[in-house]
Every structure is written in C-alpha cells, then in structure tokens.
C-alpha cells in the first residue's frame, strides 16, 4: 500500500523541492505563504530543512512568519539549526528570529545546533 503525501499547498511542495522560479510565481499569485500543512508544517520550514537559502529569502521577503511554529522541531530557527544550514541561521538571526523560543524536539535553537556538534553556528 502506498501512502499519500501529507496535505499541503502547491507552494509548500514547490519550496520543499527547491523550485525557486515556480515558488516566486505562486507568491505573486497570492498563495497563502503561511499556510500550515505537509510534513514540515509550512513552506518556510520545508525550505529551511532542505537548505534552500534563496527560497527562504523569497518567502521572508513575501511575509512568511519566521517565528511561527511548524512541526515537531518547533520554529524555523530550530529547523535550520538542527540541519546545520549556517547561512539560513545567520539570515534568520539578522531578521530577529527568536533565539529563546522554547518548543519542539530540541527545546530551543541552541540545543538543536548543539545536538549536531556544530560550533560554527553556536558562535553566530
């Protein structure tokens, strides 16, 4: 038996697969950028998990809520930290992402990055 993918928007799956141009088209068409759905919770969480820096910028520039809770990992900063995506972490920190948000699998972003032993992000 084949399981169906979790319900999510076209924008979510476009971002999950790293398709920048179509993602830009969907944001211009008025897709709900913060719609919840999919395994990672929302489009910004999906792009962050995969490390798609340009898509994260696109979503943030179009009003994506970076402090919204997404999935079992908590907020976007925890997601980017847990996957060791330095540039996305720096981008989020420069946009005042909540570093002390307590939620998700790791509790907070520092614990998420520490679980992977990545000192470069801890120094950020």
Image (spheres, rainbow, N blue to C red):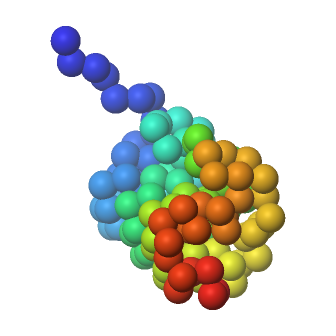
| Vertical order, 24 against 103 (above or below) | below
- The spot of residue 38 in percent (x, y) is 46, 37
| Vertical order, 91 against 67 (above or below) | below
Nearest to the observer: residue 97 or residue 35: 97
- The spot of residue 64 in percent (x, y) is 63, 60
Residue at horizontal 62%, vertical 80%?
122
Nearest to the observer: residue 39 or residue 10: 39
90 left or right of 97 in image: left
Residue at horizontal 46%, vertical 38%?
39
Nearest to the observer: residue 35 or residue 67: 67
Residue reaching furthest left?
Answer: 1
58 left or right of 61 in image: left
| Vertical order, 40 against 2 (above or below) | below
Quadrant (top left/top right/bottom left/bottom right) for the C terminus: bottom right
Residue at horizontal 30%, vertical 55%?
17
- The spot of residue 104 in percent (x, y) is 66, 46
Quadrant (top left/top right/bottom left/bottom right) for the N terminus: top left
77 left or right of 27 in image: right
Is residue 45 among what the camera can see? yes
Residue reaching furthest top?
Answer: 1
- The spot of residue 99 in percent (x, y) is 75, 69
The part of the image, by quadrant, that contains residue 93 is: bottom right
Is residue 65 among what the camera can see? no
Nearest to the observer: residue 74 or residue 31: 74
Residue at horizontal 69%, vertical 84%?
94
């Amino acid at each position: 038996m084949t399981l169906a993918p979790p319900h999510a928007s076209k924008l979510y799956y476009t971002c999950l697969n790293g398709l920048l141009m179509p993602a830009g088209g969907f944001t211009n068409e008025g897709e709900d950028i913060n719609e919840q759905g999919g395994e990672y919770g929302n489009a910004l969480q999906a792009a962050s998990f995969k490390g798609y820096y340009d898509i994260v910028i696109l979503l943030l520039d179009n009003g994506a809520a970076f402090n919204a809770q997404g999935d079992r990992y908590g907020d976007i900063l925890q997601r980017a930290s847990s996957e060791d995506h330095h540039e996305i972490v720096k981008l989020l920190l420069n946009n005042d992402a909540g570093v002390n948000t307590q939620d998700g699998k790791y509790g907070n972003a520092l614990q998420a990055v520490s679980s992977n032993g990545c000192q470069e992000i801890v120094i950020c």
